[in-house]
Image (cartoon, helix red, strand yellow):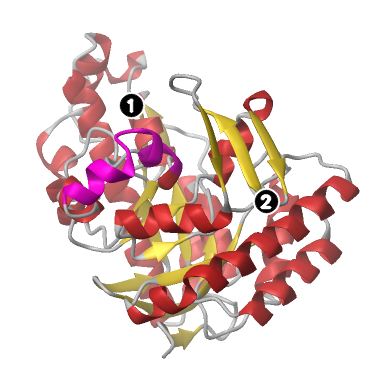
Amino acid sequence: MNAFNLTQQNKNSKARLGKLVTARGEIDTPCFIPVGTQGTVKTLSPAELEKSGAQIVLSNAYHLFLRPGTEVIKKAGGLHNFISWQKPILTDSGGYQIFSLALLRKVNDEGVEFQSHIDGTKHFLTPEEVIQIQKDLGSDILMPLDECVHYPCAKDYAERAMRRTVDWAKRSKMAHGSWLMAHGRLLFGIVQGATYEDLRKVCTQALIEIDFDGFAIGGVSVGEPRNLRYNIVNFVSGLLPQDKPRYLMGVGMPEDIIEAVELGMDMFDCVVPTRYGRNGTAFTSVGKLTIRNSPYIEDFRPLDQICSCYTCKNFSRAYLRHLFNTDEILGLRLVSLHNIHFYLELMRQIREAIRQDRFLEFKKEFLSRYLSEEEYAY
């Protein structure tokens, strides 16, 4: 049974509406997945995420494997119980984190040896073990171990990494596919191949042949120019099956998400809303706003006058600026909460625009306001 139902395709673009069915609930797509790397979306509670409209969160298998360890989480009854979040959870394999270690890891066809970034202890993980870790966590959507390369990358190196990614994906499904299907868990394949269209095509076709519940595009937002990223996404999106969800990993800024929705992508995750929030930058309907700056000393308007989040309904820019400039933790929480709400509300508006078959008009209207040069124009 297909876990994804495509409910509407826009006439004038590749933008589409769908429902992704998991063991713990349905997810409306296009969707944004708040990132809770270590079992928490930084500074925010599960109740706040749910009230903001989050239908799914992301956690990272690599980080949770190292701390607190899968045995602890298993004893707690799984990751959902451990973090008190009963909606779907997608777990990233940690491939990107492991390959970011550079000098601290060695990779071969069997798997990856790496040193913990926490205490330097050595570990060796195979693709099969990475899926087992995610099974132990109780994940609803699992990602296989892949080899991510940075931009720029020589073609021969990119090809080796791509072929290894396909082999690891095949091994992951062979070892665990039957169990995952029996328990209603979803396994996605990850398309790699750097910026080389022929490698991306080979990888995509191989993963389609293996047959996954969904497909992710990995290896973007790793230093490549924005137009090149859009070209990759557009190219791979055109090769992927219509009846499976498409997940663009690690993207991104609101304007990037809107562009990728137009190119046919369904799922997005990024640390941007909370990372920017902790640094005092808010996303608003008229662009980014750096709340530490002096123009907000006596600005008693909300961050965004058309936003209905808890922060905007109760606090002024002047107060938020005061919190950041006195190093009060509440400031980090309130701007992070606003940013998550902004992203989830943006996705709701995108879905509604697709439903009304006016996505391109929505995109034009949103970007004309959001990309305005005046940071505090209204």
Q: Earlier in the sequence, mark 1 or mark 2?
A: 2
Q: Say if 234 sits above or below 345 in the image.
A: below
Q: For the residue carrying disc 1, how many other residues have a C-alpha within 10 Å: few (<14), some (14-19), or many (20+)?
A: many
Single out the residue that lies furthest toward the left: 314
The amino acid on which the numbered mark 1 sits, given as a three-letter code, is Arg
Residue 303 in view (yes/no): yes
Which one is in front, 341 or 377? 341
259 falls in the magenta region: no
Q: Secondary structure at mark 1?
A: helix
Q: Which mark is residue 72?
A: none
Left or right: residue 260 compared with residue 91: right
The magenta region covers 62-76
Q: Position of residue 59 (x, y in %)?
A: 36, 48
Which quarter of the rendering shows the C terminus?
top left
| Most common SS among magenta residues | helix
Which one is in front, 199 or 242? 199
Which one is in front, 163 or 368? 163
Q: Residue at horizontal 52%, vertical 64%?
A: 247
Q: Residue at horizontal 25%, vertical 26%?
A: 332
Left or right: residue 368 compared with residue 329: right
Q: Secondary structure at mark 2?
A: loop
Q: Residue at horizontal 61%, vertical 82%?
A: 241
Q: Position of residue 219 (x, y in %)?
A: 66, 50
Residue 368 in view (yes/no): no
Label 1 or label 2, whichever lies nearer to me, is 2
Q: Say if 90 sits above or below 64 in the image.
A: below
Distance, label 1 to label 2, CA atoms, is 39 Å
The residue singled out by tag 2 in the image is: 110
